[in-house]
Image (cartoon, grey):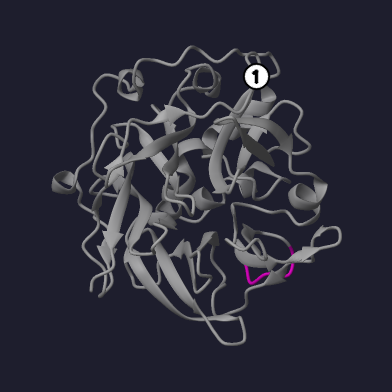
Amino acid sequence: MPEPTGRTSPARQAMAVTRNTSQKAILLPLTVLLMAVLACRTAISPAPAAPSRSDSIPTGAVKGTPANDPWPPLAAPGWSAPVPLEGPVNTAGVEDSPFIPTDGSALYFFFTPDPNIPAQRQLGDGQTGIWMAPRQGEGWGEPIRIWLNDPGELALDGCGFVLGNELWFCSARVGNQGEIDLYTAHLVDGVWSDWQNAGPQINFEYDVGELHITADGRELYFGSQRDGGFGGSDLWVSTPSGNGWGTPANLGAAINGPGNENRPYVTPDGGELWFDGEGRSGRPGPSIYRCLRQDDDTWDDCQEIIAQFAGEPALSPDGNTLYFVHHYFSDDLSRVIETDLYVSNRLP
């Protein structure tokens, strides 16, 4: 999944790889590919979409399951044991970056069939990018590809966020102002179109990474390695101003530490802030945290909700189902086997 945080060096792009194996889990699918995307300046037309994502997955790819997972995600009290998302979304490829709009009508996610192939082949495989599974009863229907570039354009897109008829996404493409920029697109007659660069304030002045805008549009939360933090990537908040968004404020020591805090999600009622960061309970890999909004609009009472190779939290509109990414690691933690979307439910 491309991530817009950090534009000054490849090391900042791959911040989850530089610390340890556990941090590699969150950004592994595309961090290795990003540098090659903008290095390649020849136009590559997207290949026609294959009949299914499964057909594009290499023969012999291992499908991770709870039965063969030596490092399963673990839930805190009050939440059900995490399980893979049912339905047609998960494959033996890489699914991550889940997001559900406030109307609950769709599940957006990132997919690539094989993170180990060269970037040029991923760009032309007709599969790597943002996908959407429509709501179907109590589950999700067959996913469809969301195209955010014209034929012949060079683009590698990910980290989708939807608010109303606007889609925010990060992209490595020819014409960027930096290595990876944030873009917006709008839903017109059922099709995402009119994609545009989010501009220098977002992409340079504030160095906005993966983001979440609250349902009322009054707060922009994001991860960034911008100056003034506690170390690594911190979480920041900005409010609307006469010139776009106001100067970001760090969320403080109750949330941010010397490691990496990133990928925020705020519940539609504005009462809960979720994010991922380095595990603090002694378990390997990243964890997912939840913090509660206080009367003074600060965040506190943070708890580690899902531990052990869990990241990129998103919730159902009613807040009762947590969606997240889980990476299947080998016994010795030397390699990632594959990546799926998981769910855990609030217990009564």
Quarter placement of the C terminus? bottom left
Where is residue 83 drawn, in percent x and y? 23, 52
Q: Position of residue 267 (x, y in %)?
A: 48, 65
Foreground pick, 6 / 264: 264
Q: How many tags in the picture? A: 1
Left or right of 101 on screen, residue 69: left
- Is residue 230 found inside the magenta-colored segment of the image? yes
Is residue 232 visible in this depiction of the protein? no
Instruction: Judge left or right: residue 118 versus residue 13.
Output: left
Magenta residues, as a range?
A: 227-231
Residue 238 against residue 100 in the figure, above or below: below
Circle 1 Cα neighbour tier, 10 Å, few/some/many (<14 / 14–19 / ≥20): few
Question: What is the three-letter code of the residue carrying label 1?
Answer: Asp
- Seen as rendered, the residue at the extreme right is 242
What is the residue that sits farthest to the left in this orientation? 67
List x then y, in percent, for residue 134.
39, 37
Residue 172 is at least partly visible in this image = yes
Residue 222 position in % (x across, y down): 62, 59
Residue found at x 41% / y 43%: 107
> Is the stretch drawn in magenta largely helix, strand or loop?
loop
Q: Quadrant of residue 312?
A: bottom left
**Residue furthest toward the bottom?**
295
Residue at (70, 37) in percent of width and height: 179
Residue at 53% across, 16% down: 124
Against 330, residue 247 (above or below) is: below
Q: Residue lying furthest front in this view?
A: 189
Residue at (51, 29) in percent of width and height: 146
Quarter where residue 36 is shown: top right
Q: On the image, numbered disc 1 is attached to which residue? A: 150
Left or right, 105 with respect to 15, comes to left
Q: Secondary structure at mark 1?
A: loop
